[in-house]
Image (cartoon, grey):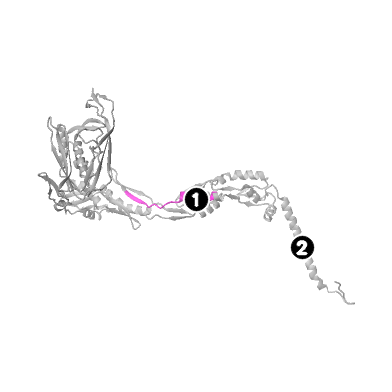
Amino acid sequence: MTTTTKAGSRPDPSRDKPRRRGWVVGLVVALFVLALGGLYLAGYLAAGDVVPRNASVAGISLGGLPRAEANDKLRAELAEAESAELELRAGEKTATVKPADAGLAIDYEATLAATGVGRSASPAHILRVLTGGGATEPVVAVDEAALTAAVDAAAKQLDTEPKDASIKFDVPREGAPKIVKEPGQQSVRVDRAAAAEELRSAYLTATTVPVTAAVQDPDISTAEVEQLATEWAEPAISGPITAKTDKGEFKVTERAIAKSTRFEAVDGAPKARIDAKELRSQTNPEITKNVKLSKPQDAGFRFEGGRPVVTKSKDGDDIMPDKLLAAVEPVVTKSEGRSIEVPIDQAKAELDAAAAEKLGVKEVVGEFTTRFPHADYRNANIGRAAEVLTGVLIKPDETFSFNETVGERTTANGFVEGTIISNGRFVKETGGGVSQSVTTLYNAGFFAGLEDVEHWPHTLYIDRYPVGREATVAWGSKDLKIKNNTPYGVVIQGIINKSTPGNRGSITFKMWSTKYYEVKTAEPRKSDFYTDPPTTDSSSSCQPQGEVPGFTATYWRELYRDGKLAKPRENYSWRYYATREVTCN
């Protein structure tokens, strides 16, 4: 475009100013870009395998080192921190994690690159090179799957179910009772996702990592148990309580209190409770020794004309459990003034004559007789057992025990020395021969249909007993137990005909009740016979004996009601030892 001016006129300079300013700005920008590009190019070209002069990683100076040397120095300096185990903590529990197992490691190549080593088109990298570098943190490589697995494994160690604090009395055989306390335990549930992030963040900067977890106190705390111990348990066993009655004075001992105390949770708080019946039971030795009480006597049975007759009951007096407890409770937590007054009440018999009459003891439902050769000890011991057992009542659902009823076979209990079987040999012992009574009683109960709870045949077969269907007892180890599985009472009657020289004696036991079961059985069967070689015995206690083969005996019983099988068939089996021939030298 051509501009013309009139002749004689001059051009206007203000019209050219914007043009000149734009040109200047453009020139400046171009020069800046050119300078910046030159600077960028210089930084790019300056970058190489040498760490910038001011660079450091985790406080470790690397400035001016070649890449390889810097790499070696970093690995040496950070080796301990890189592999140091991390302790995860939640509540009161800890678990350790090895970084390698959690997929945590230092990426040394990336860490050196971050200091400015190597060429990169990144402006940040160029700037770091141009400024000489600076402080840099290690770059961490993370295997997410390994981290998740390691955190989960550690969390399972930290996760905890709540456990209430507890308290109890420990009462040794000898010595004073002691208070035993167990602290409570919080419930802990670790937040796995949060714990993974916390572990990742703590790596290389800390060795203990508190992790996020839901923590809940137990219902019964340690502090509550400590308070109960101080305020109740300690004074409760600080000394005996003196109890006074109209018929004597006795002690409620610390042991009795400890043994009868129950610590329980009530509305989420620990409480101590004394069991009234247990306290009375634990105090009974002291009461029996020091207080003259007349025991109530239940109605029972005696035999007149060979038949059972009901005897009357007799009331007595007693210290009632609830009243003993009511007197003890106000002073049990006192350290002084531990003295009480306890009333004596009338004690009713548990079974009166009217109730005994209703038990249906009217006919023989089971009976058995065995015979024995003459021996004075047999007459004495078998007769003593029959005497003790006659009139014994087994109530419905009650279990009879021969050992508990007859007692230990001692001279004080009316027994004499006789022959018994011990470890497959005949030896002398007080009470020998009493197994004749046990076998006879077992069979009477067997044919009455009563439940066989426990019985033990002899180890050696004795031919005057039914094979297999016989029993023996040993104080403290073997018993005869029979349960009355009928709705009627069962009364035992023992009848002995003593032996004389040349004449055998006999023992009969009868079970009196109301017939409830019809019993079917078969004669026991012998099988699997064997023998043992003979032996010679030089001891002073030797008893000569002949050889008897060992064998297995089997038999069964079925119980019927109204012509129908009431229970599955009961199968019995017993293996007898062989009796080897013994010659006394």
Earlier-in-chain disc, 2 versus 1: 2
Query: Residue at image x 63%, y 49%?
Result: 110
Mark 1: few/some/many CA within 10 Å (<14, 14-19, 20+): some
Q: Which of 196 and 49 lies nearest the eye of the viewer? A: 196
Q: Quick check: 495 above or below 312?
A: above
On the rendered structure, is 141 left or right of 120? left
Q: Quick check: 77 above or below 504?
A: below
Q: Is residue 164 magenta?
A: yes
Identify the image quadrant of residue 469: top left
**Does residue 252 show up?**
no
Q: Is residue 179 magenta?
A: no
Find disc 2 in the rendering and name its residue.
Answer: 28
On the rendered structure, is 559 left or right of 361? right
In the rendering, at what x and y percent does residue 225 appear? Answer: 35, 53
Q: Which of 7 and 461 lies nearest the eye of the viewer? A: 461
Furthest residue in direction front, as rendered: 563
Point out the stretch of residues depicted in magenta.
146-168
Find disc 1 in the rendering and name its residue.
Answer: 152
Per the image, label 1 sits on a secondary structure element best described as helix
Q: Which of 129 and 566 lies nearest the eye of the viewer? A: 566
The quadrant in which the C terminus is found is top left
Q: Amino acid at mark 2?
A: Val
**Does residue 113 show up?**
yes
